[in-house]
Amino acid sequence: MPEQKQPYKVIRAGGRMFTIYLEYDEQLKENYPVYPDFTAHPEYTEEGRPFTTAEQESCTHCKPKTAGEPKPFDCGGCGWFYREQTPFDLIGVCMCEARRKY
């Protein structure tokens, strides 16, 4: 019988609530949080903006948060990445118009 996932926390973003679960890693012998894979399974706000995780690899539309800085390697460092509650939220919304789904 598969082990039951343990709720870890709930993150609010783009008018939605995402429950993050802990899964057990046999090799590491510890639990780790599992975040949605928005690259493999895209989800959008009611306005058509894509949800992303801070650790997701940045896209071709990424921009630095501060002018003159190099482009970031992940969405968390992108100027388009909007966090709803705290500057440490790992799930946010991409505010880039080029990625918006109409």
Image (cartoon, rainbow, N blue to C red):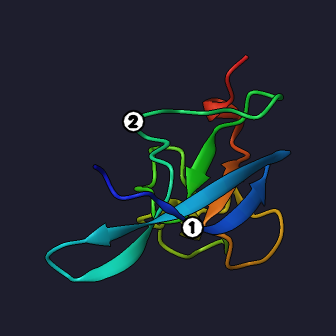
* Residue type highlighted by circle 1: Gly
The tally of labels here is: 2
Q: Is residue 15 left or right of residue 91?
A: right
* Disc sitting over residue 65 in the figure: none
Q: Is residue 4 left or right of residue 54?
A: left
Q: Is residue 27 left or right of residue 53?
A: left
Number of the front mark, 1 or 2: 2
**Residue 10: where, in percent of width, then height?**
71, 63
Using the image, determine if residue 76 lies above or below residue 97. below
State which tag comes first along the sequence, 1 or 2: 2
State the residue position of label 1.
76
Q: Residue furthest front?
A: 1
Residue at disc 2, secondary structure:
loop
Q: Residue at x 75, y 64 (%)?
A: 83
**Residue 100: where, in percent of width, then height?**
68, 29
**Residue 102: where, in percent of width, then height?**
73, 16
**Residue 15: where, in percent of width, then height?**
85, 45
Q: Quadrant of residue 31?
A: bottom left
* Disc sitting over residue 40 in the figure: 2
Residue at disc 1, secondary structure:
helix
Using the image, determine if residue 1 lies above or below residue 82. above
Q: Quadrant of residue 67?
A: bottom right
